[in-house]
Image: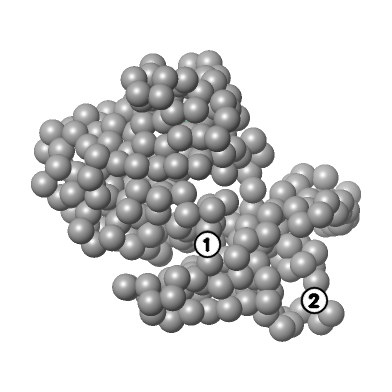
Amino acid sequence: MAGTVMKVMALMLSNFLVTSAVITTIKVYKVASSHNDPFPICTIRVVEIQGISRTSCAIKCLEEPLCRAFCVKGASCHINGGHLDGHWPGAAVDHPHYKKIFTYDYCYAILDDGDVTSHIVDTSSSTFHTQNLYPELVVNGFYCHIPQYHGPFHYCFMTGTSESLGYWRATLDSPQTISTINVWTRGDGYAKKLFHNVEITFGTSSDFNNPVFDSYPNAALFTGEMITFNATSPVTGRYLEVRDLSPSDALCFCNIQLLQ
Ligand SMILES: *[C@@H]1O[C@H](CO)[C@@H](O)[C@H](O)[C@H]1NC(C)=O
């Protein structure tokens, strides 16, 4: 019946499912409730709700197509466009670039179907940029999806500026079968090709000499975008490498998502 919205929900420990009508279900998981500066910038809107609960705030998130996370503070439901990784550690005290800390009562992030990114237990890279753009920021940072504000840059990974043909590596705790990998690229308008001609390999060899999962021969937009790597058929492995095949620039990207 057009215009009728039926809300059903199932509670499961700290993870829970929220379904609105018959069309959408989101799975959410609890994340750290403190954030540094850029997170509030990514807030799409704040809704006051009488008798607020995680479910009523989750339903507001469900109504907003760009919502990736939501936080409750008092009676306010903060609908946020930030994709938070499973390893999000909460606000960093004395963050070199984002000094302010915002604390909510609690926060949840959307977990996409088949997302196995949280199985990544170790990251490394050929080199990293002197501005503390560490390899782990790819899995413990966040990425703001709202179009006006892709990024932020200081939650991205980048190799040293003078390095070409660099790489980023991840090790999973156990073999996982993956068919799609999403990578979010730097989006602050910096006019260099920092995600250009990139190949991803994935498999069971711990020396990272694994078959090519998929490659992306183009250059990502300077305004940031999500690039999807597709396996021809699902691949099982523990060792993943993102390789820069372009000899001209460094390699930079902000977030990765591994999907079954
Ligand atoms: C992966 O598949 C999607 C959807 O078909 C497509 O848009 C994307 O370009 C593909 N990725 C690559 C690297 O070819």
Q: How is the image coloured?
A: one colour
Q: Residue at x 30, y 41 (%)?
A: 125
Q: Is residue 237 visible?
A: yes
Q: CA distance from mark 2 to mark 1?
A: 25 Å
Q: Is residue 15 left or right of residue 241?
A: right
Q: Which residue is mark 1?
A: 89
Q: Give the vertical position of 134 relative to 228 (above or below).
A: below
Q: Earlier in the sequence, mark 2 or mark 1?
A: 2
Q: Identify the residue under disc 2.
A: 52
Image position of 240 (left or right of 104): left
98 left or right of 3?
left
Task: Please give the name of the residue rendered at 29% of the width and 32% of the height, measured from the top-left corner.
Answer: 243
- In the image, is residue 252 above or below residue 106? above
User: Which circle marks residue 127 in the picture?
Assistant: none
Q: Nearer the viewer, residue 31 or 26?
A: 31
- Residue 6 relative to residue 154: left or right: right
Q: Local crowd at mark 1 within 10 Å, few (<14), some, or many (≥20)?
A: some
Regarding mark 1 in the picture, which secondary structure is present there?
A: loop
Local SS, label 2 = loop
Q: Residue at x 46, y 49 (%)?
A: 139
Q: Nearer the viewer, mark 2 or mark 1?
A: 1
